[in-house]
Amino acid sequence: MDTSRHSTALVRDVTDQEITTTSSRRLRRPADFLAAARFMIRSGAHPQAGRTTLRLAEAFAARMPRSKDGHFPFSVLATAHELGLSRRTVLNHARYLRELGLIAYVEHGSKTNSLRTRHGTAWTSEHGYRGTATLFAAVAPPAWDHAKGRRTDRRGYVARVIGVTDEGRTHAVNDARRAAKRKTSCTPSLVVPQDHQHLKVERSSNYTSRKRATSSKHTPTTSRPRLSPAECAQNIGLARQLRHDIWWLRGCVRRLAYALRPLFAAGCTREDLTTELLAWGVPAQLRDPAAYISHELDRLRRFGRLAGAPVSHMPDDRVDTIGNRYRTMLQRRADHNASTWDHYADQLRPELRRRLAEDHPPVGRQSRTEYRPVLREPREDFVRDLPQHGRLPTVEPRDLYRARALGAGANTTLALDEEALGWLVQLRDQRDAERACAALAAELDNWEYEQRLR
């Protein structure tokens, strides 16, 4: 397709590079994004965009499947390390993609520690630091849609394709044909294709008459029964579901359905197949899961373990849908425990209690009033630590401890001598004098203030 006649204006204004202001529409598929990137870069719309810009677009396309909206994170250092480029080069080519209208900002990055936000109050310095990355959205510029002959409704990020023009229909047909040529066929055959270059080709006519073609009898190449198209589609759908349940199932889903056909014919459900296949001893380096399944089923058939019933199907006598088997188990356990309890209550318990009574005589519980605490220090040391100006002739340390334990007050009245009483009287007189001086000073201050007002 000639890209030279499709000109486009670069988006130089930074304010027009957001998803809320961009004129490009949203893309979700990486293939569409790469097609738009190749067209815009090869069209020469940006004089500085080139192969490196396309490499950066391919790196972005690889991250798009992680988001259902086609958004992808952009870390400058991680991308530079991935592509083997410098930090400045990555930033420049990301700017080229924005100016071409291929990517738009969803969220601007910052130096905020995302690990601290993730861990919340449990964050510590050991978690480290990780800045908030920029979030881009893959978009398709209007020039690409115009070149492909697409008709869109609305404008900007929320625009969508509603049809194509005659020229766009031609482009779509050509793209579909090219994609069909690149796509490899996936057959259910389990035989590895062989190289036929060594075969000898003889001269003969390759024409077969209609009568001979219709009358010829084709012998089946396998002993497996033929299935209807609906049954094949059902098996393929079940095989596709099993690929999500079993880690080692991969490859062509048609080949997997063909290899699992004996189990499907035996009536195995999805749960039965998942249980059975997960129990197999799968090699660590499994190259062809379909061939491995066929080999294992042949081995099970040789040993008689694949008769015709589901491999992991539970017998009917073990199915307990209404709980009868569970209630029977509880009753059997109760009957067994009842005889054991009767033997203990009649023969073992009386003798056990008698021996315990002999070894551990009963001890009566003391009341709170009979509490007698243990002194933590000698009485002489306790009295020596009392204040020097008083003494406690009537209060013993044991009484104080008892009063504290019972939550009651103790008689701690000081019995003071004449010298201590005189000292207390002097303290009282000094306190009264200080209060009188403070009152007199307040009155003098009020009198001076009134004199100044006059």
Image: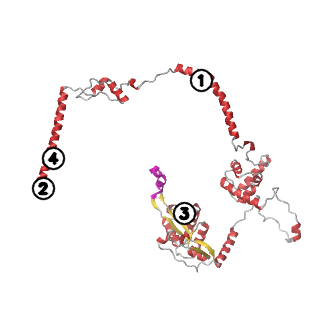
Q: Quick check: can you spot residue 192?
A: no
What residue sits right under mark 1 in the picture? Answer: 349
SS under mark 1: helix
| Residue farthest along the bottom direction in this orientation | 5
Give whichever of discs 4 and 3 has the lower sequence position: 3
Q: CA distance from mark 1 to mark 2?
A: 100 Å
Give whichever of discs 4 and 2 has the lower sequence position: 4
Q: Is residue 143 left or right of residue 402?
A: right
What residue sits right under mark 2 in the picture? Answer: 453
* Residues in magenta, as a range: 112-129
Disc 2 crowd rating (10 Å Cα; few below 14, some 14-19, many 20+) is few
Choose between 87 and 340: the one closer to the eye. 340
What residue sits right under mark 3 in the picture? Answer: 72
- Asked whether disc 1 touches disc 2, contact meaning CB atoms under 8 Å apart, the reply is no
Q: Is residue 113 magenta?
A: yes
Give whichever of discs 1 and 4 has the lower sequence position: 1
What residue sits right under mark 4 in the picture? Answer: 442
Please state which of the two labelled residues, at mark 3 or mark 1, is closer to the viewer.
Answer: 1
Q: CA distance from mark 1 to mark 4?
A: 87 Å
Q: How far from the left and from the top, in percent, is residue 319? A: 72, 44
Magenta-colored segment: predominant secondary structure: helix
- Residue at left offset 50%, top offset 71%: 21
Which corner quadrant holds the C terminus?
Answer: bottom left
Q: CA distance from mark 3 to mark 2?
A: 80 Å
Relative vertical location of residue 400 with respect to residue 135 in this rendering, above or below: above
